[in-house]
Image: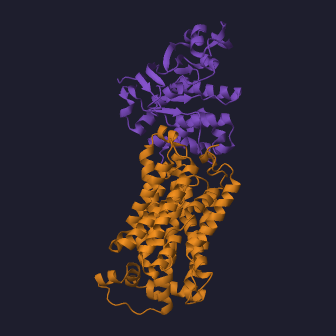
Chain colours: A orange, B purple
Amino acid sequence: MTVSQAIGGRKPGRGSIAALMAASLGIILVAAVAQTAGGSYQMTWRQAWDALTDPAVWRQPSVLLRLFFGESFAQAHGFGDMKPLATSTLIVWNVRLPRVLAGLLVGINLSFSGSIFQAVTHNELASPYLLGVSSGAGLAILTVLVLFPAWGPFIPLAAMAGGTLAFLVVYAIAWNRGTSPVRLVLAGVIVGAIAGSLQSGIFFLARDINVMQNALAWTVGSLIGADWRQVRMILPWTIATVVLGISASRDLDLLLLGEANARALGMAVERNRFLLAAVAIMAAGSSVAVAGIVGFVGLIVPHVVRGLVGSAHTRLLLGCLFAGPALMASADAFARLIANPVQIPVGIVTGLLGGVFFLCLMRQRREIGKP
Amino acid sequence: MRNQGLEAERLRLRYDPHGPPVIDDGSLQIPVGKISALIGANGSGKSTLLKALARQLPPESGRIILDGCDIAALAPRQLARKLGILFQEHIAPRDLTVQQLIFHGRYPHLGLFESPTPEDHAAVETALQIADLEGLRHRPLGELSGGQLQLAWIAMALAQSPSYLLLDEPTTFLDIAHQFDVMDLILRLNRKLGKTIVIVVHDLNLAARYADHVFALRAGKLVASGEPSKVMSVDTLRYVFDVEMRMIRNEADQTFFCIPIRRAGPR
């Protein structure tokens, strides 16, 4: 039994994709309201809802634009001064909502990245985290932050460059006339460990204790302090990922028939795999740029969604578009509110969830790891 | 009128650049509109030759001409519209349905953002019909028997609508009844749709019964080629397989059978 035959073992129900979307939307909604209401400035759900739907924001396009694009954009376009908003509205719109949105986008990026990597490497254990791509991206970002702070605006690009480099190294190490799932993951873990050590090394170059604390939260993956800047940073890449990923569904499906069959059916296999890996790296890199190294989301979400809706990629990616954000939103709400007023990085929650999930997967599916 | 046909010219193939060639200086011409069988012992290079004919393995030297063009010069989709190949091992998600699998055969006919046209649907329907899989179209591959699975894969290659279809041991691992199902399907593809077919077979009696033309390989060399009744002689088969055979001819329906008797020659 080959690996891809193990991918998507169960028979999906017909209406399951709609149910998955509805359930995910429900989870997102509850998590979002909990996130906007809870925290050090406590509101009732009613107040949070009122702040979200505050007509002072929604009736004035200039207020919305100012919030989304930031103060300097508003000045440059002569929006004039903003009318004062209610405190609860300000907190919801400036702090809590953008964090929720950033989390949703990170969830989309990571689950798309994982789905694409799993098809491209023909390996159901693949994910940006386990392939070392996240760590490579993280190392690149830290290097830029600490050593070349002036390059700040190019952080997503640096992350993608670092992710690409890590992926190429992992592939080169694992390559032995084709790659086995286990070799790839081992190589990914090794490269991840090396990148992790280098990251810790870089911390010590940063003398400021504040920088170190931030950097630490960031290496385990965190949305603490995420605001509209992070949303603006990731949004174009998320849109590109979703459009490219879904439009490549047929190619991703064909890759599940194996390299030889894909080639026999007229696919330029090497070129397409390279381009698709580039999309997955773009998705993971931009997500690391915003939220740091949030582990396991890219592994769990595709697995769960595949089990529910099947392995065909239009359905799988559509499912990930909803389930990825649902996982991130609920994990971040939990991480932020469980020990209020102390905030836990969301990566600790996904790491715990993902680790347990991974163990169950190994227990349950005996064929994993067989050469 | 363009030159029709599939031929190999002075082909040399190897997997390992330091090892010996698997096929050395092989030239052959696949008869158009016929069923050809490649026979030979394990390691004689027949599967390798088949892969090279479908550009799955770039030749070290020599070339393969398909309808007058060197296949190395064809775009991947262009080649896939003319020639299909099925391998011995089938990899697919278990939840993929028969119809979804067959739809993959339309890949070379579809652009990146193109949705399937009525022509694509018609090709899939035809393939389902000919392979007699209409009743199983929504069945996931994981629930099919080995024989049904093989038929589904052949139907996928058929939906590709190639003029040439290459099959690597399509009947291996199947029980006798399913071997007939598969071979009868191959026969229909040839007789009804005029496909040129090349199969690698181990079972000499299947080759004798179904092939119009046989190529016999030994150690990377083509040693005999022609009609089954001519190629499959006791002497040739002894040379190709190192086995003594007895041939039984049935004059009534012009069929013949090979019965292996014992190993011949040195081990």
Q: Is residue A236 left or right of residue B168?
A: left
Locate residue A284, reporting x and y percent: 47, 63
In the image, A208 versus B95, the foreground residue is: A208
Q: Is residue A333 left or right of residue A235?
A: right
Q: Is residue B89 left or right of residue A85?
A: right
Count of picture labels: 0
Q: Identify the residue at image location x=50%, y=14%.
A: B223
In the image, B101 versus B73, the foreground residue is: B73
The image quarter containing residue A34 is bottom right
The image quarter containing residue A282 is bottom left
Q: Is residue B131 left or right of residue A174?
A: right
Most distant residue in the top direction: B251
The image quarter containing residue A45 is bottom right
Locate residue A367, reporting x and y percent: 66, 48
Q: Establish if B176 lies above or below A182.
A: above
Note whether residue B5 is visible.
no
Note whether residue A46 is visible.
yes
In the image, B170 versus B188, the foreground residue is: B170
Locate residue B124, reporting x and y percent: 54, 40
Q: Establish if A170 lies above or below B235.
A: below
Q: Identify the residue at image location x=56%, y=29%.
A: B168
Q: Identify the residue at image location x=66%, y=33%.
A: B147
Locate residue A226, reporting x and y percent: 47, 78
Q: Quadrant of the N terminus of chain A?
A: top right
Q: Establish if A128 lies above or below A217.
A: above
Q: Identify the residue at image location x=62%, y=60%.
A: A304
Q: Quadrant of the C terminus of chain A?
A: top right
